[in-house]
Amino acid sequence: MTAPALALLAALGPTDGLAGAACTGRAPMFDADLDGETGEDREARHDGARGLCGDCRVLEVCRASLDSLPPQMTGIWAGRLLDEGKVSHR
């Protein structure tokens, strides 16, 4: 799990409601950007992450937690791309 993902989990506190999430063990797939990645590769990776979210059994719990995320949060969360805590439309 990446350092930003670990920091996020610590900020959220208990995550029992997220047990069994489809993203478990796939943190880099949900990061905003990866070093050396092209824009096309990033879009494909984000599309894959959104697909996992769309089929996830805890999607509604993730969506409910959007408002409690730290403002610096970036990447895919609950099938949405966040840019500094706000839903981005890229």
Image (cartoon, helix red, strand yellow):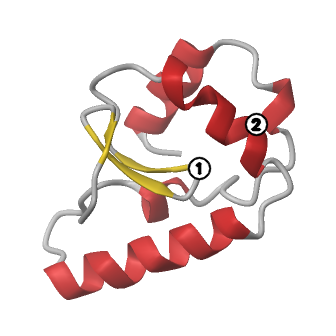
Q: Earlier in the sequence, mark 2 or mark 1?
A: 2
Quadrant, the C terminus: bottom left
**Left or right: where 2 falls relative to 36:** right
Comparing 67 with 33, the one in front is: 67
Q: Which mark is residue 43?
A: none
Residue toward you, 58 or 1 = 58
Rendered residue at 53%/69% (across/down): 49
12 shown above or below 1? above
| Label 1 crowd bin: few (<14), some (14–19), many (20+), radius 10 Å | many
The residue at which mark 2 appears reads as 61
**42 sits to left or right of 24:** left
Q: In what element is the residue under mark 2?
A: helix
Q: Is residue 30 left or right of residue 90?
A: right
Q: In the displayed structure, would residue 82 be above or below residue 17?
A: below
Mark 2: give few (<14), some (14-19) or many (20+) Cα within 10 Å: some
Nearest the viewer among 34 and 58 is 58
Give the residue type that dot 2 points to.
Val
Q: Find the distance from the CA under tag 2 to the CA under tag 1.
A: 8 Å
Dot 1 lies on which element?
loop
* Residue at 59% in and 50% down: 78
> Mark 2 and 1 residues: CB-CB less than 8 Å, in contact?
no
Residue 72 vertical position relative to residue 49 in the rendered view, above or below: above
The answer to whether 16 appears left or right of 42 in the picture is right
Residue 83, given in percent of the width and then of the height, sits at 25, 43
Residue 37 placed where, x, y %?
18, 75
Residue 31 spot, x, y in % from top left: 37, 54
For label 1, the residue is 78
The residue lying at 22 percent from left, 87 percent from top is 40
Three-letter amino acid code at the position of disc 1: Ala
Indicate the position of residue 60 as horizontal and vertical percent values. 76, 44
